[in-house]
Image: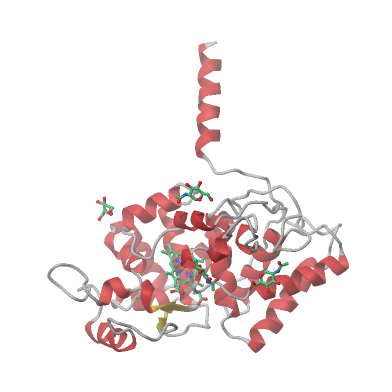
Amino acid sequence: MVANNLALAFALLLFSISPPVRSLSLNYYDQTCPKAESTVTNVVQKAMMNDKTVPAALLRMQFHDCFIRGCDGSVLLNSTRKNQAEKDGPPNISLHAFYVIDVAKKQVEALCPGVVSCADILALAARDAVALSGGPTWEVPNGRKDGRISIANETSQLPAPTFNISQLQQSFSQRGLSMDDFVALSGGHTLGFAHCSSFQNRIHNFDTTQDIDPSMQQSFAANLRNTCPMHNKVNNAGANLDSTPTAFDNVYYKLLLQGKSLLTSDQALLTNIRTKALASKFASSQEEFYQAFVKSMIKMSSITGGQEVRLDCRVVN
Ligand code: HEM
Ligand SMILES: *[C@@H]1O[C@H](CO)[C@@H](O)[C@H](O)[C@H]1NC(C)=O
Ligand SMILES: *[C@@H]1O[C@H](CO)[C@@H](O)[C@H](O)[C@H]1NC(C)=O
Ligand SMILES: *[C@@H]1O[C@H](CO)[C@@H](O)[C@H](O)[C@H]1NC(C)=O
Ligand SMILES: *[C@@H]1O[C@H](CO)[C@@H](O)[C@H](O)[C@H]1NC(C)=O
């Protein structure tokens, strides 16, 4: 009796603290939509030939989707007259390329109507974005469902670029992700671009005694201050997250060790013994980075939510 109650209490506790889990499976669409995956891959490939920023956009979109309400395509929903959606919430400046998901969805719907969720299409597109940028590839477990809720102010649940290591740890662990996942997934910053506003805290008025974050390499910081003056008038100004922003490689970690990372949250990797050791390992072995990244991406993209297969990724059924 006591044991039973204990077991029940434990189960309830587990249930209340772990993120919702729907079981996903490999080959999920083998019978119902065998061409789904290759269709998504072709669309991503075509889109990136016209716009080199597409892979970075898709990878970041997947991260934002999974960190809010699970990977349920909530990031894809449009605002409505009554509701401001996630994509119109504050840290949205670099979210773009939603049209790529629309094109893929349209083609997949033509093949197998009402079968493939927008959340799965996004997870596949993010995988393709990494692989087509020269990174690793992997099998994506599928079977996610799309959600019906997307609320602008819930983007405040995303980790901020100014977060320190304990805040980052908390943000990841709330979603069942470890510090090792945090180190590997931060490697997503091997692709893409950040606006000045995302790292201005490190290059202007850093603290009461110093203007510039002393952990930043000096000439690197000086260049960033040129690009991003204090009263920045150029709205789109910013810098690439690493020196090879369209190649999925381990250069991000190499530069990080040299004090050439943009965000406080990147620099935070070096403020803990364990995360620093792992970042150093990834800097010296691209292969180890790839293996860890794949493992952690599968973990992140398995945080599920949602209940339907949307027909249009921008509107609920
Ligand atoms: C650890 C917590 C994270 C923080 C605080 C963070 C923050 C940011 C910020 C502030 C930007 C620049 C936005 C802008 O100024 O336009 C950015 C860009 C980006 N992030 Fe993260 N991020 C985190 C984790 C991740 C993860 C887990 C991934 C994917 C695995 C990811 C992928 C990207 C990509 C690809 C870009 C470039 C987007 C583009 O160029 O369109 N980030 N991130
Ligand atoms: C969603 O919003 C975009 C951008 O505002 C707009 O172009 C598109 O037509 C909208 N789509 C739907 C289905 O509401
Ligand atoms: C970003 O969100 C703000 C509201 O915080 C909104 O006014 C703006 O239109 C959004 N920008 C984009 C590109 O969606
Ligand atoms: C977010 O907006 C909802 C209404 O749309 C409101 O009830 C809630 O208090 C807001 N939360 C925060 C943190 O601002
Ligand atoms: C991180 O920031 C939080 C909130 O500002 C603070 O309470 C905490 O002590 C900081 N942790 C570290 C390790 O700096």
In front: 103, or 143?
103
Quadrant in which the C terminus appears: bottom right
The reply to whether residue 158 is visible in this rendering is yes
Q: Residue at x 44, y 48 (%)?
A: 173
In the image, taking residue 143 as reference, residue 251 lies left or right, namely left
At which x and y percent is residue 93? 49, 73
Quadrant in which the N terminus appears: top right
**Quarter of the figure with residue 43:** bottom right
Pick out the residue farthest to the front.
81
**Quarter of the figure with residue 221:** bottom left
In the image, taking residue 270 as reference, residue 313 lies left or right, namely right
At which x and y percent is residue 283? 39, 73
Q: Is residue 98 above or below residue 181?
A: below
**Quarter of the figure with residue 256:** bottom left
At which x and y percent is residue 277? 33, 63
In front: 120, or 151?
151
Number of on-image labels? 0
At which x and y percent is residue 261? 34, 75
Q: What color scheme is it?
A: secondary structure
In the image, taking residue 82 as reference, residue 209 lies left or right, namely left
